[in-house]
Image (tube, helix red, strand yellow):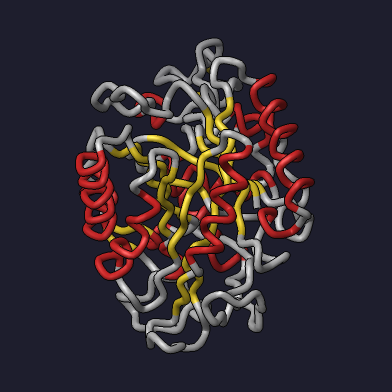
Amino acid sequence: MRTHPVFSLVVGTAVAVSTMLSPSVSAAQSATKPAAAATKAKAAKSATGKRTSTGQSKATDTTKKKLQGALGPQSGDRHLAFKGTGSDLDTLWPVKTAAPLPGSIFPAKRVLAYYGNPLSKRMGILGEFETSDMLAKLERDAAEWTRLDPAHPVQPALHLIAMVANPDPGPSGKYRTRMDSALIEKVYGWAKSKNALLFVDLQIGQSTLQQELPWIEKFLMRPDVHLGIDPEFSMKASGAVPGRRIGTYDAADINYAIRFLANVVDKYKLPPKILVVHRFTPKGVTNVRNIKLDPKVQFVMHMDGFGAPSLKRDTYYRDIKREPVQFTGWKQFTKAKNDKPPTTREAILRLWPAPLYIQVQ
């Protein structure tokens, strides 16, 4: 879940004039409670014993009980999103897929991506600070992640919202605005200056991926540019105004994006692309089991929620861990109003599967 505003932008201008309505944490993530009841390990039997047929008390052996995991604010170190806390889902990870092709980023590296749009200080860290300060902070942050997990050295990245959903139809009638190519080139230049990747992220409003992906191909044809798609602002299924309802992608939509990227890889003789799909509700991505992977595309299901650490772990467990696809991601907000308190890097690394894509907003 995100709290960034949605622009009404005339392409090429730098004025944000409207703020996205944000769904509440409780509305988007309250579904974790039923999941807790369904997934908790069986309660340990009482050691006080129970009556035998002869009326005598028989002690119960408690020495070999399975570790009892939990969800929710009282779970602490027993949270089922962590590895080894009793969840049967642990065995589903890592997902068994084809061996990574040459030039693949995952699983050898972890991507740390700074997210946002330089036309707004409120959409994320990418536009919040002066460029030099932001890039210096990215370098320091990447070094700290690498120090904590040297087995997965960090590949830095900038994650640009290249298409912004709007609360009004705009000239296209699609409730979305494409960023000017000059803006995308500017952010690409920032990334190149730090040997970072660039992700171009699409909030398609009432448009479709079929209509919008060809527009961004001129950037995706570069080996260091990858794709993010945001179900929250995909309103094709409901016809609603972005921000007034949470959108959705079906596996069929995601499969189209995978095929498109695989074709770009073939067409331009590129290393594999990364596709990041944001998710913070069960209905944000439907028919997950029907997603069809391609070795030319590395797939990340990215936990996009905000809140206290236990709430975010609940969302990670519900929407990421229990529906395996390939690789996973974690959203880290920099504002206390979103993540209060923030989840520590050490706690994020305890998750299973451990996220290989970290997005900072």
Q: Position of residue 339 (x, y in %)?
A: 72, 52
Q: Residue at x 74, y 47 (%)?
A: 134
Q: Between residue 241 and residue 168, name the one nearer to us.
A: 168
Q: Is residue 119 left or right of residue 39?
A: right
Q: Position of residue 149 (x, y in %)?
A: 62, 20
Q: Is residue 129 left or right of residue 348?
A: right
Q: Is residue 354 left or right of residue 91?
A: right
Q: Is residue 321 above or below residue 7?
A: above
Q: Residue at x 61, y 77 (%)?
A: 13
Q: Position of residue 300 (x, y in %)?
A: 41, 42
Q: Residue at x 52, y 22 (%)?
A: 84
Q: Between residue 136 and residue 148, name the one nearer to us.
A: 136
Q: Between residue 318 and residue 143, name the one nearer to us.
A: 143
Q: Is residue 28 above or below residue 109?
A: below
Count of numbered labels shown in the rendering: 0
Residue 43 can be seen in this image: no
Q: Is residue 215 above or below residue 176?
A: above
Indicate the quadrant containing the N terminus: top left, top right, bottom left or bottom right. bottom right
Quarter-wise, where is residue 350 in the image?
top right
Q: Residue at x 55, y 15 (%)?
A: 151
Q: Is residue 42 left or right of residue 125?
A: left
Q: Position of residue 108 (x, y in %)?
A: 45, 21
Residue 251 can be seen in this image: yes
